[in-house]
Amino acid sequence: MRHQFFRSKFGFYKLPLFFPDATRAVVKTLDSKDIESTKTEGILVNTYHLLKEPGRRVIKKFGGIARFMNWKGPLISDSGGFQAMTLVKKMPGMGKVTDDGVIFKPIGGKKILLTPEVSIRFQMDLGVDMVVVLDDITPQNVSYEEARKTVERTIFWARRSKEEFLRYCESNKFTEENRPYLLGVVQGGDFPELRKECTQRLVEIGFDGIGYGGWPVGELGDFNYETGKIMAENTPSNYLLFGLGIGKPHEIVTLYDLGFRIFDCVLPTRDARHKRLYVYNANSIDEIDVRAKNFYSYYVPDKEKYYSDSKPVSYACDCLLCANYSRAYLAHLFRIKDVSALRLATIHNLRFYSILTEKLRENKT
RNA sequence: GUCAAGGUGGCGGAGCGGUCAAACGCACCAGACUGUAAAUCUGGCGCCCGUACGGGCUACAUAGGUUCGAAUCCUAUCCUUGACA
């Protein structure tokens, strides 16, 4: 039986949940009350970014990130590996990956050594509900041999992370009931046998769930659902399956059907800032059918044809934007480059995603 | 009225005899964005034909002229801005 609920300091939340990325303890252009208004239940923050700013001391003083940003809901932190790792692998001048961890030197910043232990400790200090192990990301288009190496290192690090996690829980007197979830991450790129092996070896180490790591989409935007299937088939039924960095609405629906229950992604928020709003192809929230073939489309807010359009962006939405303002007004805000355009668009897209998870919860499959 | 500077594509603004359908910016159109170096990036943008390489047509206030060749030089006209009356 798959999990039905996500345990958080603030209670139990029905799955599935989508966690927009509040990488630096803020969903860009929104504050915590805005996020709440979109009926978004949880958010994801990033270890690497928060380690840099505001840093360990401030976090400790507030007793965790939730109080720091006044967020009262599910909270997950990412290991920080993704940023350092993808950047270092893209631009070797910025640092390197060794068995010990990632040494990363951002432009104009000071060197940071991120090890599995450092990552776990800091995430525990953040006081989140789920911590994610540091993993070695399999880059796109690498050989089997190279992919295999990343899997080996991912497993090695996962084991060290687990040990560090147990140590921390013990010395800080966490119990099985109040400790955070620990998530392992599956690598192996597009090699099914590697993903399978990685999944099985993570399960041997023992986690509360595993995440779909690396790049789920190919160069042509084709999503690799096969990996998701392999993960689901090779994990105990009480494991939480997490689609890290996933994804587009229809991808979430498909992975949900495979057993995935947690997702996080920058798409709704970044797209909003880049003038892409998501709109259900329906005339009311009740009429939305997330299993219909093309159940949503994109709306580009500042087109000339909308300059005087008095309709809302969507009738199948009850967000701050759709409930109060016309397309014409939004277009105007974007045209004069007022920051409120980004805020309203972000609020709208987050509400789109929260409606998506609401629909999945109703619609048992 | 006199003198001066100037009139370039939807707008701003380069160019000042050939390599100019005209830099660059804005606007507009299309596309991308998946554990956020991203309020970003890419492409198109006179008209017509072609998927494209390309070809044709009309264009740099208007009308003439000089030249093998003009947005670029000359003349006239119209307009704009500034200075002086």
Image (cartoon, coloured by chain):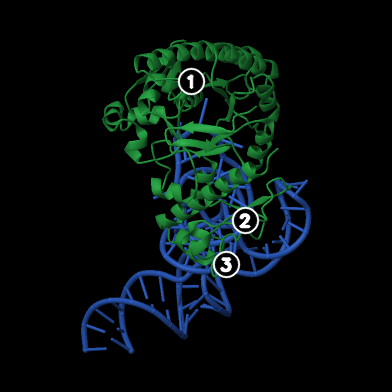
Residue at horizontal 51%, vertical 10%?
A156
**What chain does badge 2 belong to?**
A
**Tag 3 subunit:** A
Q: Is residue A53 visible?
A: yes
Callouts 2 and 1 on one subunit: yes
Q: Which residue is mark 3?
A: A311
- For chain A, what colour was chosen? green
Of mark 2 and mark 1, the one earlier in the sequence is: 1
Q: Amino acid at mark 3?
A: Lys
Q: Quadrant of residue A15?
A: top right
Q: Is residue A268 above or below residue A103?
A: below
Q: Earlier in the sequence, mark 3 or mark 1?
A: 1
Q: Spatial distance from mark 3 to mark 1, Cα to Cα?
A: 46 Å
Locate residue A316 relative to residue A339 in the image: left or right: right
Residue depicted at 39% across the width and 45% down the height: A32
Q: Secondary structure at mark 2?
A: loop
Label 1, residues with CA under 10 Å away: few <14, some 14-19, many ≥20: many
The image quarter containing residue B82 is bottom left
What color was chain B assigned in the picture? blue
Tag 1 residue: A133
Residue contact between numbered discs 2 and 1, judged by CB atoms under 8 Å: no
Q: Are marks 3 and 1 on the same chain?
A: yes
Q: Nearer the viewer, mark 2 or mark 3?
A: 2
Q: Earlier in the sequence, mark 2 or mark 3?
A: 2
